[in-house]
Image (spheres, rainbow, N blue to C red):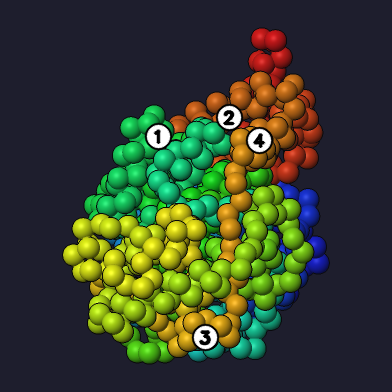
Amino acid sequence: MADSPLPAPGGALSVLREVFGYDSFRGHQQEVIDHVCAGGDALVLMPTGGGKSLCYQIPALVRPGTGVVISPLIALMQDQVDALTALGVRAGFLNSTQDRASRRAVEEAFTRGDLDLLYLAPEALRSEATMGLLDRGRLALFAIDEAHCVSQWGHDFRPDYLALSVLHQRWPQVPRIALTATATEATRAEIATRLDLTDARQVVSSFDRPNITYRIVPKQEPRKQLLALVSTEHAGDAGIVYCLSRASVEQTAEFLSANGIAALPYHAGLDPVTRARHQSRFLREDGLIMVATIAFGMGIDKPDVRFVAHLDLPKSIEGYYQETGRAGRDGLAATAWLAYGLADVVQQRSLIEGSEGDLAHRRRLSAHLDAMLALCETVECRRVNLLAYFGQQSAPCGNCDTCLEPPQSWDGTVAAQKLLSTIWRLHRERGQSFGAGQAIDILLGKRTDKVTRHRHDQLSVFGVGAELADREWRAVVRQTLAQGLLAVQGEYGTLALTAASDDVLAGRRQVMMRREPERTASRARSRAGRAGEVAAELPERARPAFDQLRAWRAATARESGVPAYVIFHDATLRQIAITRPGTLEELSAISGVGQAKLARYGEQILGELTALDRAG
């Protein structure tokens, strides 16, 4: 295939304005787009909501031919194509969900040159028929979305991605762009190597999502804690709740529903039809909460998710960052909330201990978990800690829980020594192994049936920990585990000393610990006030117009069978409600109103505003 000619100067900016309705590029977008338009390869890291998709969509529209997007998100391809079609972009997809006639129609459109973008699943490139189809068309570029899937260092490894180096081998003149929202330096290096992109331009945007408030709370009754969060701070908002197990997903969705909150479960144990129906409802309806395992969410383009909650500890910061990044994609205020406790640490350590794979694999899992635990236990700014993991320096944000309600650190050396001594005596004097609960009961001097049955009330450490309450001792156990001073063994999660324990017992190492701040009613109210910023950003005089436009959008979306955000984002409707344009020309100046949407919906929007004026 002959080299594609360079785009005309200003072509990318023209497409941005006319098709997508935006006046200017954000961050590194223009650098990436100009580079790919000129035929260069790129590896791009941008946070969720940072505008990654424009980095390949605009070059696909500027360069001759069809942009081919490799995406693992089969269940979302239809929505992605619908969103592009609403913008006047000629888009299609090929995957296993299609019947033969639909597939043939897309293939013929591609070979005729009638598609601007074609979405494929990575496994499709294992088929010689697909490769032959691509040979018969003109290729503008290859975009490899969710590129972290290629890396075993990342959080969502998929073997199908390993075959994508064939793109450069078979079509060396076609530019390639790989994109992801999360990658450490090690992950980035592996992506570049596996995709044969070591010579590509690497563009790393800031990982900061300043509109997200990060909060990590001690886990007590997590479902009731979640209910309080939703009821007091996010009533009527769309949100995602992550749980590790299918049973927990089902129970949490039932709990929320029983308390009058619209919630749906999503996990791999549900049949495909139910999963698809729940995902479709979440995307198309306002104010729904999806309770899910981590199988849900990648590529979800719902911009108005106002909170993401975790009821279980994520396995890595990459996973946590990717999942929390699904909140606030529209740039408005959002919450990332995690309930975290001792059982989470024991469970994760135990899973690693019993995992398949070699020692290097377990060490990699432990390194991921250690970083996640450090984020949970820090007394410093959460955002500084989070960004540092990805190699980015920052100042305290003033908008996370540790900035807003600074915790105290305290010298927990003596407490740690008492705990470690208890574990040592159980092992050394009795040859026994127990979990955290038994050690705490011994320290508190509780003569439970289990304590007296094993005669643990005769140990010299019995009752030496009365200065701390049960809840405080659980925090001590959690933090000694987090710092690697204790290990978890076996399927029952019993505690054992580590090589680092000796230095603490001998007094050669100080152990600093985090003490949770007391949460007062005034602080709770201030948090609720900050979460309410989304509503506060809209002037009172604009509320009737905004509500009217949202109702119109909902009806239009139902009639068209697409998610509401495909029609317009909330941010666009807010701007329309505030500025009240009176002509199509004035409406075209609103961010997010491109030429296709202006032609399709412009008169309807003006009609809604006129009707509101008459009614008022």
Identify residue for label 4: 522
Q: CA distance from mark 3 to mark 1?
A: 55 Å
The residue located at (42%, 89%) in the rendering is 360
Label 3 vs label 4, nearer the camera? 3
Q: Nearer the viewer, residue 459 or 398?
A: 459
Query: Which quadrant: the N terminus?
Result: bottom right
Split into 4 quadrants, where in the image is the C terminus?
top right
Residues packed near mark 2 inside 10 Å, few (<14), some (14 to 19) or many (20 plus):
some
Q: CA distance from mark 3 to mark 4?
A: 44 Å
Task: Name the residue rendered at 34%, 38% in the picture.
Answer: 255
Please indicate whether residue 197 sits to the left or right of residue 594 in the image.
left
Check disc 2 and report the residue beneath it: 550
* Residue placed under numbered mark 3 in the picture: 506
Name the front one of labels 2 and 4.
Answer: 4
Tell me the kind of residue under disc 4. Ser
Q: For the view shown, which residue lies furthest in the top direction? A: 615
Label 1's element?
A: loop
